[in-house]
Image (cartoon, grey):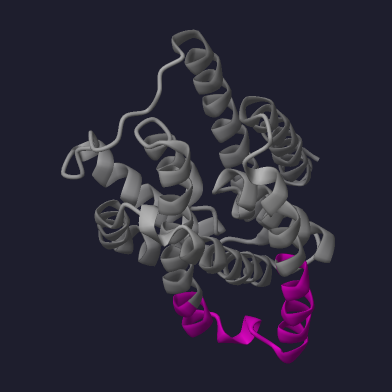
Amino acid sequence: MSGITFFATFIQVLTGFGFGLVAVPLLLFVLPSQQALLAGMILSMMGSSVQGFQMRRLVRRDLVLRLLLIGIPGLALGVVLSGYMNELYIKGMVGIILIGYVAYQWVQLKSSALEKKVPEEGDINASSKGFVMVAFSSGLLNGLAAIPGPPVVALLIKHLTKDVFQATTVTFFFFQYAMTSALKILVFRESFTLPFGITLVSMILAVVLGYVAGQPFRKKINEAQFKKLVYGLLFIIGVTSLTEPLKGLFF
């Protein structure tokens, strides 16, 4: 589990997102569903807090606040619905989210390579229906599967420069995970046991090591090639997450 946490933190340091996308599907293989979701959120929150503080001057606070407030109804609905879903359904949903997200981002990479367009800041209409749907669906996905990133990343990556994008997303994820973790602990108190707490503490060191290891590479790495590698890994994880639910459905 420490290896999963280290790798997920390393990815988040380099890209500004991705902890939940990497960690949650893999943690679902080794922990009960609610514990896997809670561990993913708490550990991601820790990594996001350090990176967010470091880049705090670049954060688009207006976007973070609106995304959080509009996403609250979706978050609450997602937490309630997650209590009625068994582990196979959650794994399957995570797999579908990952595969769909990778397919979308792969198309975006191809189109960006053709257009070579540099994102311009300040042109996001936070009152539009599209923005509201992004915020609501992000909250819903976080409550259901601890993966709030895909809708927000898909929106912001088009409009913000790399550093502002990273600062804004990690700050948003910190507060989104904090709200969801508090709500899940309140609703699913039986999942937060002493053995789980000990396991969680043991993974904190991996978060620290992943953060430190990622720093030297953050500005040096070829971003386009790295994203292709990450999306490839996420696709494999998504397919793996779908395998077990499909077996249960058809066999």
Q: Find out whether residue 60 is within the magenta segment.
A: no
The percent coordinates of residue 50 (x first, y second) are: 56, 67
Corner quadrant of residue 204:
bottom right
Instruction: Identify which residue is drawn at 76% across, 53% down.
Output: 7
Above or below residue 18? Residue 109 is above
Q: In the shown orientation, is residue 87 left or right of residue 1?
A: left
> Which of these two is toward me, 58 or 189?
58
Residue 27 visible from this viewpoint? no
Magenta stretch: dominant secondary structure: helix
Classify the position of the N terminus by image quarter: bottom right
Farthest top residue in view:
114
Instruction: Identify which residue is drawn at 18% across, 39% down.
Output: 128
> Which of these two is toward me, 135 or 208?
208
Q: In the shown orientation, is residue 3 left or right of residue 219?
A: right
The percent coordinates of residue 60 (x first, y second) are: 31, 52
Q: State which region is magenta.
A: 182-207
Instruction: Identify which residue is drawn at 77% across, 67% down.
Output: 206
Residue 168 visible from this viewpoint? yes
The percent coordinates of residue 176 (x first, y second) are: 43, 64
Q: In the shown orientation, is residue 242 left or right of residue 112?
A: right
> Which of these two is toward me, 157 or 73?
157
The percent coordinates of residue 235 (x first, y second) are: 70, 33
Q: Find out whether residue 185 is within the magenta segment.
A: yes
Q: In the shown orientation, is residue 186 left or right of residue 67?
A: right
Classify the position of the C terminus by image quarter: top right
Corner quadrant of residue 217:
top right
